Amino acid sequence: MIGRLNHVAIAVPDLEAGIAQYRDVLGAKVSEPQDEPDHGVTVVFVELPNTKIELLYPLGDNSPIKGFLEKNASGGIHHVCYEVDDILAARDKLQASGARVLGDGEPKIGAHGKPVLFLHPKDFNGTLVELEQV
């Protein structure tokens, strides 16, 4: 069901410092910051030859990333994103297998302009999983 690894998301306490680290220290191509109000984050994508790193920074007081950073002050891996061909079919199969979809179970549009869903980390070895339809 899952396809390529689309990205690994890392929550950062200082977005500009995160950008500088990947761009200036590691020499990576880094996108401009993009606000995603529906998800409560500002994102930046670090382009790699085989995948992407998504830097996440809180957007607003209700951001889920704000809570994550309160528990992990220096930041850290927040989630992994896998591609799926049909997000509704993937959701239905996962739910039938007992996996929990976060939120209301309906896909939202993600940072790439495509439908996404998140799966409960307790169902996936403590890892928050995002599915993105390609």
Image (cartoon, rainbow, N blue to C red):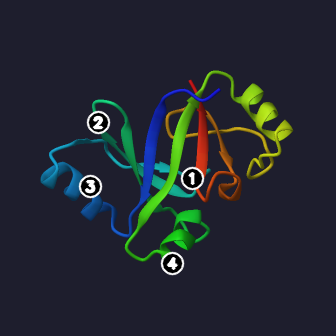
Say which residue appears at 28% left-offset and 60% top-offset. 18
Please tell me whether residue 107 is drawn above or below residue 44 in the rendered image. Answer: above
Q: Is residue 70 left or right of residue 31?
A: right
Residue ID for mark 2 = 48
Q: Considering only order in the chain, which callout, 2 or 4, is on the residue closer to the N terminus?
A: 2
Callout 2–callout 1 Cβ contact below 8 Å: no
**Does 1 sit left or right of 12 as displayed?**
right
Q: Is residue 12 left or right of residue 120?
A: left
The kind of secondary structure element at disc 4 is helix
Q: Is residue 1 left or right of residue 71?
A: right
Q: Which residue is mark 1?
A: 37
| Label 1 vs 3, first from the N-terminus | 3
Q: CA distance from mark 3 to mark 4?
A: 20 Å
The residue that appears at 33% across and 68% down in the rendered structure is 14
Q: Is residue 33 visible?
A: yes
Q: Residue at x 59, y 64 (%)?
A: 64
Q: Earlier in the sequence, mark 2 or mark 1?
A: 1
Amino acid bearing label 1: Pro
Residue farthest to the front, as pictured: 125
| Tag shown at residue 70 | 4
> Viewer-proximal residue, 21 or 34?
21
Residue assigned mark 3: 19
| Residue 65 location (% of width, % of height) | 53, 64
